Amino acid sequence: MEVMNMTKSGFLPLTVALLVICAAPLLAQDESRWLVARSLIEPTDLRIVWQQNLPLGKSETLDQLHIFGNRLCALTSKNYLSCLNRNDANVIFSSSIAPAGLPVENLQAFQDELITIVGSKLLEISSDLGAEKTSMQITSGVTCPIVRNESFFYIAGSDKRIHVQKAENKVQVFEVAAENDSLITSILAEEDFVIFATEAGNVISIMPDKPVKLWQFDAAGAIVPPIVRGSTSLYFACEDTCVYRIDLSNGELLWKYQTGAILDNSPQIGQRAVYQPIPEVGLTAVRKDSAKLLWELPDGLDLLAEDGDRAFVVTKSGQIVAMDNIKSKKLYSIDIGQPLEYVTNTADAKIYIADAKGRLACLEPIR
């Protein structure tokens, strides 16, 4: 009886120990499947909405992420484009859009089309099917993403002119250039106006269907692409070390924020804050209405998303950091442990990140 009692009292701890030992590799294996380990996310108020593992080939990596409306587009190093519903990760299409090795640049969207430059060719792709709709050779070169409105394409050429072509047949109707003949770095096309920026520091608004200038704003350095539209304002970074906000209707200066560094990235525009990457400083947030400094985050790379008065930020080292825009302080951070591919989402609070292996994840705050 004593032997039996000893056996039982010794057997149960041994069984538990064996289960723990056997389960540990399984738990570790399960954790390794996730781009964001559950053990890292549990102490925060974030949750994993979904994870999609893209089927990458040998030596193939995930290179670009883009958001277009409710679509999340992922382009690989071998020019394979996957388009997902960004809310539930359902695949809308997945297909090769160009031979591997051919540069695919400046992916944009207009209504139900994706627009990109493949080599020296303008390519229109159906955003529902992934099939090529039209293509056209670009003979003027391209200095910034090609954009369009309902009626026209606007192509900034290396000849320092915008070539305006009819959307329906690609016939050129006019050209336009800055008066100082400077290189064009960014174009914003709307139905009732077009705005372009230049290497000489000009921001110029013209009529969409004729080369008639509406207004012009001049900064002291090259405009860093792209210029970004808010509801009634334009925001842009400049190589004169300043971030600008100007009136969309007349080009009048509303404020400028001095950063003290030559800027090489454009700002992201949130609900109440403007987020500007600054070399050797990190990511800086200023008030949208007054340009008053809210916070600076060393190693901060870019905005991921906002949730009310909180900003979720990605760092160069691969952390997700939650910042409080009211109290101007860091709330918490999640260390993924590797540099991340990401895309900024200003439509809602969902966060989209990925790694080079093709693990694509969506996170969101728990409400």
Image: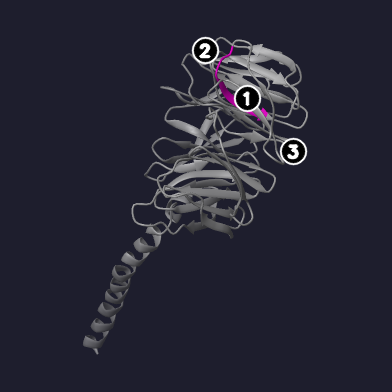
**Which residue appears farthest toward the left when viewing the image?**
3
Specify few, some or many for label 2: CA neighbours under 10 Å numbering under 14, 14-19, or 20 or more.
some
- Counting from the top left corner in percent of width and height, residue 127 is at 63, 51
Amino acid type assigned to the residue bearing label 2 in the image: Asp
Q: Depth check: 179 or 288 in front?
A: 179
Q: Depth check: 256 or 91 in front?
A: 91
* Secondary structure at numbered mark 1: strand
In this picture the colour scheme is one colour
Q: Is residue 46 visible?
A: no
Q: CA distance from mark 3 to mark 1?
A: 17 Å
Q: Is residue 248 visible?
A: yes
Q: Which residue is mark 2?
A: 240
Q: Nearer the viewer, mark 2 or mark 3?
A: 3
Q: CA distance from mark 1 to mark 2?
A: 24 Å
Q: Nearer the viewer, mark 3 or mark 1?
A: 1
Q: CA distance from mark 2 to mark 3?
A: 35 Å
Residue drawn 35% across and 67% down?
26
Q: Which residue is mark 1?
A: 162
Q: Earlier in the sequence, mark 1 or mark 2?
A: 1
- Numbered label attached to residue 324: none
Q: Quadrant of residue 272?
A: top right
Please say whether residue 109 is one of the residues in the magenta stretch. no
Residue drawn 54% across and 32% down?
139
Q: Nearer the viewer, mark 1 or mark 2?
A: 1
Please say whether residue 183 is one of the residues in the magenta stretch. yes
Side of 299 where 257 appears, left or right:
right
Q: Which residue is mark 3?
A: 150
* Magenta residues (range): 181-188
Amino acid type assigned to the residue bearing label 1 in the image: Ile
From the image, give the main secondary structure of the stretch colored magenta: strand
Q: Is residue 164 above or below residue 204?
A: below
